[in-house]
Image (cartoon, rainbow, N blue to C red):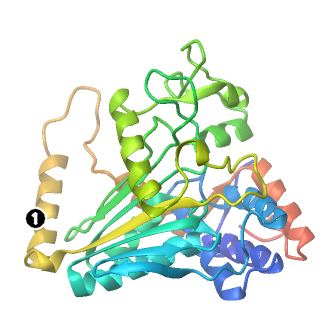
Amino acid sequence: MTRHVTAERLQTLAAGVLGAEGLPPQEAALVAEMMIEADLLGADGHGIFRLPRYLERLRAGGFNARPNIRIARERGAMALVDGDNGFGHLVMKFCADEAVRRARSHGIGWVGAHHSNHAGAAGVYALIPLAHDMIGFYVAVGSANHMAPWGGLEMLLSTNPIAVAIPAAGRRPVLLDMATTVAAYGKVKLAAQRGETMPPDWMIDAQGNPLTDPARAGEGTLMPIGGPKGYGLALIFGLLAGTLNGAAFGRDVIDYNHDDSSVANTGHFVVAIDIASFGDLEHFKAEVARIGDEIAGSVRRPGFDAIRLPGERALSVREKRLAHGIPVPPALLEKLDAIAAACGLPSLQDQPE
């Protein structure tokens, strides 16, 4: 039976485990916070679900527990960060904060990173500038190649996600958070853990036939959104987040799922845009809200009960999960309790829901 656990309990568990494995307390708490933010937004394949895999790489030397995250190059509104092989959550929080700082002075801040790692859900980092009345962008090279070029068979591309957050007055912000594939690979891993089959449009095998068994995911390729258009987006995002930053792309990408010890050199970037540099902040937010209301109130196609803006589901899920807890399936709960016991921490099952 799926158990609902408060965000605070899951965050305390993750921070305690990471601290026991060598991260300084402040960094362990920050990684845990970013992880659970993914769960709160409904990105279950990027939150506490990832903790067992993170620990495997950390223990094998794949992550640096005490990185010296620093600015390697800078010019005006731009900066390049060396993540020193630290947790991606730490690197991208550093980058997002730096992008906001530069946007205050220059109207925009664009901060890229190399030698980072898997950082969880893209939307978490796009939302950081939003808290400062800025528009946030986040783009990353995925942590393993699961997609072939359009018409090809060799895995040279990843899910390469993008997230964009735009504030609105009196309504939820617009939050686009998407992979360039039909499904993020984390959803494939979740389906495998839960014993579920995949929809036929997620993956194809080498003959081009739908692949619906997640246990056979290694035999197939994820499908890009919009056919060749999604492939094109994945390529462009990889060049901007990977190649431009001196990070891995193409055949250089390390398979995070199967390689415990190699340095991943994951690339990402965060952009913060100061809305007030373009005009009146409150007018812009009111206009975003007006356009949102216009779209939501427009004529619907038969079979649709509502027209929603990007992010409405995720932000609604966040509100519900803050109030009622985050669902943790039995298999994951068992893994987390085993990890907790090994670190001398309380079991989630022994605590009230």
Q: Give left or right: position of 174 versus 334.
A: left
Q: What residue do we see at 53% from left, 82% from top?
A: 70
Q: What residue do we see at 26% from left, 86% from top?
A: 104
Amino acid at circle 1:
Glu
Of the 4 image quadrants, the one containing the C terminus is bottom right
Image coordinates for residue 297, horizontal then vertical, percent: 15, 47
Image coordinates for residue 119, horizontal then vertical, percent: 57, 63
Q: Quadrant of residue 68?
A: bottom right
Image coordinates for residue 243, horizontal then vertical, percent: 45, 55
Q: Nearer the viewer, residue 48 or 325?
A: 48
Q: Quadrant of residue 106?
A: bottom left
Q: Give left or right: position of 164 versus 288.
A: right
Q: What residue do we see at 29% from left, 37% from top?
A: 305
Is residue 277 placed above or below 191 in the rendered structure? below
Image coordinates for residue 199, horizontal then vertical, percent: 54, 26
- Can I make out residue 133 in this image? yes
- Can I make out residue 120 in this image? no
Q: Which of 52 and 337 is in front in this view?
A: 52
Q: Which residue is label 1 attached to?
A: 287
Q: What residue do we see at 66% from left, 49% from top?
A: 254
Q: How many labels does the image show?
A: 1
Is residue 116 placed above or below 78 in the rendered structure? above
Q: Indicate the secondary structure of the residue bearing disc 1.
A: helix
Q: In which quarter of the image is residue 205?
A: top right
Q: Which of 268 and 76 is in front in this view?
A: 76
